Amino acid sequence: MKKLIGKMMVKDKDRRHGGTGEISGYGYGSGSDADDRSKAPALQIDEEGNVFAAPEMEMNDLSGTELNEDAGDSGRKDQLQSRANAPEEAPENEASRRERQEPAQGAGEPDEFRSESGGGGSASGLRSETRDDNSGGAARSGKGSEARKGFRAGPRSPEESTGRESRSKEQDHSGGMPEEEAFGIKKLLQDGNKGPIQASFSRKRSAADQGGGEQLPNAEGHGEAPNVRRSEDAGQQKQASGAKGDKQGRKGKGPSNGKASKPVDDPIPLSMQEVKDMLEERSGLGTSFDLVLREMVFGSIRVGFYYVNGLAKDQVLTMVLDRLSYADHAAMENNPAESLKEYLIPHIQVSPYQTMKEVIGQVMTGATGVFIEGEKTALVVDAKNFPVRSTEEPDLERVVRGSRDGFVETLMTNVALVRRRVRDPKLRVEIMQVGKRTSTDICIGYIDDIANPKLVEAIRDKVKNVDLDGIPLAEKQLEEAIVAKGWNPYPLVRYTERPDVASAHLLEGHVILMSDTSPSVMIMPSTFFHHLQHAEEYRQLPIIGSYLRWVRFLGILASLFLLPLWYLMVLEPGLKPTGLEFIGPQNPGKIPVLIQFLLAELGIDLMRMASVHTPTPLSVAMGLVAAILIGDIAVKTGLFTNEIIFYISIATIGMFATPSYELSLANRIVRLILLFSVALFKVPGFVIATTVWLAFLSLQRSHTAPYMWPFLPFNAMGLLNILFRLPVLKHKTRLSITRSKDGTRQPAPE
């Protein structure tokens, strides 16, 4: 036994320190080839006489190099069982199998080792097993205790010899590292397996171990890419693991998605320099200081990260780069685009793209493009970081009780606010881009089993057919593009900045449109009476909510008809009701009443605009100037009469009480038209103008919904819901205005 061990250690020393020529028993070729391979593990012996691998390179492949004659048949059975459970390798051809097989030496002649030359027979004992350990490089982990059991030297079956030789070839191809340690990816990609894996990181490997002696490019000077490149014309995958020709590397492989790629008009260049030149020409790389192309080398393959500095989430990208810095040649060699997408990039959203236009468009939205040298496919990592303000309560829709959050200028935040309230899996949020230059993200939201499919399809088609250079003003320009309004002052869509209001309309069967960079959400379809509703009514008891609604209705009617009716009574004193003879100015003043109305209207609009643009510290001073200097002095000098100021103030308060800002501005235009009609034609002018106004509103349609519903056409249930704020349990069905698929709001009693 000691003589056997001595000879083994002498041969191991000769192999590790030998010169040129083929080393007997190990199957190495030239000396340069041997230098590129990993050194064989050193053998040690314990107190009981068992031979095992040194701790620094622990043997975990049951190779049978430990020749313990006392191990018995149990070790042999364990070995055969372990090899039966090993992955099945591709068999070699019959000729190669005959060349490598030879009758083994008997167990009683362990001291005899025959040299293997050319295609001669294999040596017993340490023949193919020792060659596996030498060519395989690093040993597999997790089997150290079984490796120390030792096995009796003896004959090996042809299947075992073939499997060991095939594994040895594959390990040589992966740069001296077993497949299982190359992030566990190579084998999975060859077999088409996309299941979960356990990636192992090898941080201590040298450059020679990673690439089989292949030198990495000069990252500092952005040197040439490695010679291992994928041919653009050759697009076939390897058919089986361990097949011949595997040393072709990346040559002869198909596209990264494993399917035959279709011809594209704007392909991604294979060279990183060509990618850089194209980015400089098409997106301003090198001219715009905020555009960055970060080039790095991962596993001998050059990869470029292209992003907008102000929109990229730097912490996420740093984590991705840190993960990829441990990728070796074996991990990136076989289908690198698929490896990065499926296994190596730790991010929740990674998408492949085939054209430069798509990648550049995604980068302009804040994502990060990943270009891989030699690959026709680029990856886009959705690591965006938009400037965003807090979701504070909107100024136009404040409530005494209720939520204080509101929509912001970031689309994803707005979608999340709606998702938080409507946790229905049937909620759909479809996204598309509008504008040739702005590429503004537009989101269509609806509940699939409630909203009318024809309504959704009509809105989707209108958004797709918008042909504009851009919509930098977001929702307002989009409204004009999809709603043919012309000079109609009345809003045909409802705006809201409250997520609870948008969610409530979704449950009624409406469709919402959200635009990036805008805190306002459009609700469609919407009628005239939708613009009269306010969230405060639904935050109070039904009777209180109904009272507040009626007060609001009276204020809106006053803003429309109070001034024209008062002016009509001034012109026609006989129209004054009994007991209201005091109505009318006692001293008309030096300026006609109609001119006073026009000056007062213009003055109020001027003060409103000034209050919007005046900084907060100066708003108090502006109010004092408007109330005292203008109002009081104008009355004392006789420029305005007291009654005109009084009625103008009531109409203005009614306008401010209108929930919809767009509706209040439209009502102001109608009020001016009524004043001119009364001034010109008196009673007939007032009647005709009012009739024309009602007929005009009745003919308007918000998509397929009548604008004056439920008055025209008449709907009793809809009218009841408008006049009174009904209790929640009374809403058993949805209103027919949306023609929803599911009209039941509460389950029917059993």
Image (cartoon, helix red, strand yellow):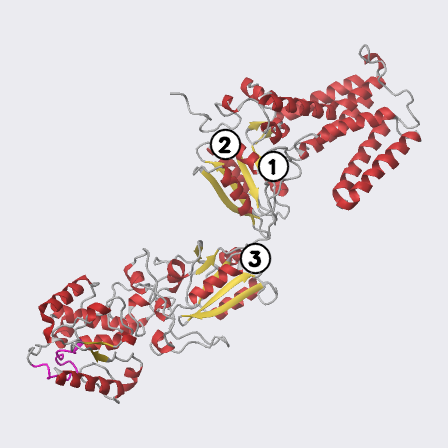
Q: Earlier in the sequence, mark 1 or mark 3?
A: 3
Amino acid bearing label 3: Leu
* Residue 245 among magenta residues: no
Q: Is residue 750 visible?
A: yes
Mark drawn on residue 507: 2
Q: As drawn, which residue projects farthest toward the bottom?
A: 19
Observer-nearest residue: 54 or 156? 54
Q: For mark 3, give the secondary structure.
A: loop
Magenta span dominant secondary structure: loop
Decide: few, some or many residues near mark 3? Use Cα within 10 Å; few <14, some 14-19, many ≥20. some
Amino acid bearing label 1: Thr
In the rendered view, would you say 668 is above or below 419?
A: above
Decide: few, some or many residues near mark 1? Use Cα within 10 Å; few <14, some 14-19, many ≥20. many
* Residue hosting label 1: 496
* Residue hosting label 3: 311
**Spatial CA span between label 1 and label 3:** 27 Å
Q: Which residues are magenta?
A: 109-128
Q: As drawn, which residue projects farthest toward the front?
A: 47
**Quadrant in the picture for residue 636:** top right
Residue 260: x percent and y percent? 35, 58
Quarter in which the N terminus is drawn: bottom left
Residue 408: x percent and y percent? 60, 45
Amino acid bearing label 2: Leu
Q: For mark 1, give the secondary structure.
A: strand
Residue 142: x percent and y percent? 26, 66
Which residue is drawn at the image coordinates 35% and 62% (left, top)?
Answer: 199
**Spatial CA span between label 1 and label 2:** 15 Å
Mark drawn on residue 399: none
Q: Earlier in the sequence, mark 1 or mark 2?
A: 1
